[in-house]
Amino acid sequence: MEKLITLNRQMKKGLSEHRRAEARWESLLEKAFLMEDILVSRQSKEKKIRSTFWIEKTGPINEMVEVIRKKKNEILKISNVFIKLVWYWHVKIKKIVFMVLSVFFGIFSLIVILSEVTLFLQVDLSVFGNLIRVCQGFVETEVKKLI
């Protein structure tokens, strides 16, 4: 009887792991197909991402886009602007924004490491220590600590 119980547990665990792996596989396939569609649409003259796997957005932004699509021709131009904005984001802007953010957070990480290394030394190299030392009052000090 014990063998049946352990076999049942192992089967349940294996089944849940299989379902988890299958869901992850489907998610990764959707991302891969979307990336392929974005790469193909880079050369598009109409500046639209044509994708069969595009996930329809939900929420207030999607409701706004649907309302815009239902209006007359003038508002349809705004919808086309939104579609072009999505294309520009995926093709041009996203890469630049991520590179700028990575450099910013890399520099910020180095400043934090420098502050931690020089915490107990007599050398005053800590950027954050100098920032707090310059503060005049309690409120200003607390605000700068939060930043």
Image (tube, rainbow, N blue to C red):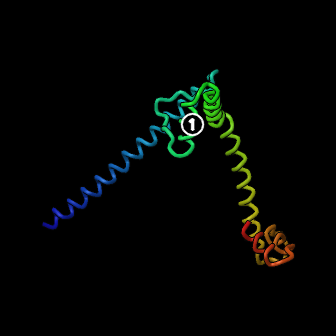
Residue 73 in picture, x, y percent from top left: 61, 24
Residue 124 locus on image (x, y percent): 85, 73
Quarter of the C terminus within the rendering:
bottom right
State the residue in front, 80 or 146. 80
- Farthest residue, direction left: 1
Judge by depth and name the residue closer to the eye, 51 or 14.
51
Residue labelled with disc 1 = 65
Q: Quadrant of residue 13?
A: bottom left
Q: Residue at x 25, y 59 (%)?
A: 10
Q: Is residue 31 visible?
A: yes
The image quadrant of residue 4 is bottom left
Q: Where does the N terminus fall, quadrant-wise?
A: bottom left
- Disc 1 on helix, strand or loop? helix
Q: List the single residue furthest toward the top.
A: 45
Is 64 left or right of 29, judged from the image as shown? right
Counting from the top left corner in percent of width and height, residue 137 is at 84, 77
Left or right, 142 with respect to 32, comes to: right
**Local crowd at mark 1 within 10 Å, few (<14), some, or many (≥20)?**
some
From the viewer's side, name the closer residue of 13 and 3. 13
Say whether residue 136 is left or right of residue 39.
right
Q: Is residue 14 above or below residue 65?
A: below
| Count of marks overlaid on the render | 1
Tag 1: amino acid: Val
Q: Is residue 39 left or right of residue 130?
A: left
Query: Does 67 appear above or below 6?
Result: above
User: Residue 36, percent across and down?
Assistant: 53, 31
User: Among all residues in the image, which is located at the extreme front?
Assistant: 72
Q: Residue at x 64, y 31 (%)?
A: 78
Instruction: Say if residue 91 shows up in the picture.
Output: no
Residue positioned 37% across, 48% down in the render? 21
Would you identify the image quadrant in which residue 143 lies? bottom right
Q: Where 31 falls versus 114 (above or below)?
A: above
